[in-house]
Amino acid sequence: GIQAIRCPAGLFFDIEKQTCDWKDAVKNCKLKNKERKIKPLLYTEEPLCQDGYLACGDSNCIE
């Protein structure tokens, strides 16, 4: 769900850094949410990728 984050007076929330910062340092005030990255599949019944690679939820293999 949506979570409200309150910053101390004079600071603004930077959605990319996920922290409060000075207004001049925050360049993404208009963003409402952060793009979610696809997480790797750490455990699968059968290997989906060659040794040394991780399988992502989108079926790609990464080093």
Image (tube, helix red, strand yellow):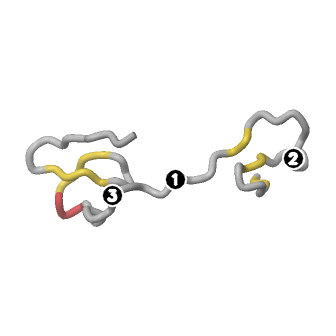
Circle 3: residue type: Lys
| Horizontal side of residue 25 vs 61, given as left or right | left
Q: According to the image, label 1 marks what residue?
A: 36
> Which residue type does callout 1 highlight?
Arg
Query: Residue at position x 90%, y 38% from top?
Result: 46
Task: Look at 35% across and 42% down and name the residue there.
Answer: 2
User: Image quadrant for the N terminus?
Assistant: top left
Q: Which secondary structure, mark 2?
A: loop
- Farthest front residue in view: 1
Q: Secondary structure at mark 3?
A: loop
**Element marked by disc 1:** loop
Q: Position of residue 14 (x, y in %)?
A: 30, 54
15 shown above or below 4:
below
The residue identified by callout 3 is 32
Residue at image mark 2: 48
Q: Residue at coordinates 82% horizontally, 36% vertically from top-left?
A: 44
- Which is more toward the observer, 40 or 32? 32
What amino acid is found at the position of numbered circle 2 in the picture?
A: Leu
Disc on the earlier residue, 3 or 2: 3
**Mark-to-mark CA distance, 1 and 3:** 13 Å
